[in-house]
Image: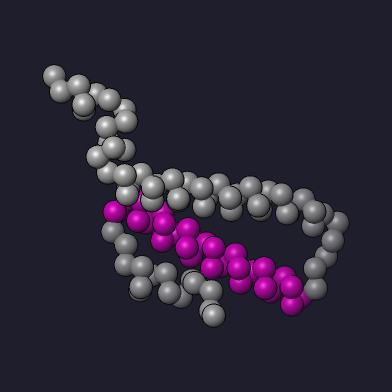
Amino acid sequence: MDLDRMNPIAPVAQHPDHAIRFLDLITACHNFTVDVERVVPRLRDRRLPEDRRAAIHSCIARARAVLDVLENAMDSSEIDVDKKLVPALPRR
């Protein structure tokens, strides 16, 4: 029996770049969720003007597209960032 394989830290030690990317994704998802949960209740009983609602809808569409790409990447382990993410990324 190989004791290194049974050690729960072994995969992290063998692939530190993957562990860092994993933690980056977990942190990004967590931060997004926490920020939205913090901000949305502050909008209660307020009706935003049409231009501001349109801006929020645009951001939601971009976030949804990015999340769809992320979910696909997690399920298939294949991602073509250039083709799939470019339409969702903010324009600079």
Tell me where the magenta segment starts and ends, as one range.
Answer: 50-77
Whole-percent x and y of residue 8? 31, 28
Whole-percent x and y of residue 61? 56, 67
Front residue (pair 79, 50) = 79
In the rendered image, the vertical position of residue 12 relative to residue 86, given as above or below: above
In the rendered image, the vertical position of residue 57 relative to residue 43, given as above or below: below
Tell me the quarter of the picture where residue 6 sits: top left
Front residue (pair 57, 27) = 27
Q: Residue furthest right?
A: 45
Tell me the quarter of the picture where residue 1 sits: top left
Quadrant where the C terminus sits is bottom right
Residue at the image point whose x is 80% and y is 73% from the top: 49
Query: Residue 21 vs residue 47: left or right?
Result: left
- All told, the count of numbered labels is 0
Tell me the quarter of the picture where residue 46 sits: bottom right
Front residue (pair 80, 8) = 8
Whole-percent x and y of residue 63? 54, 63
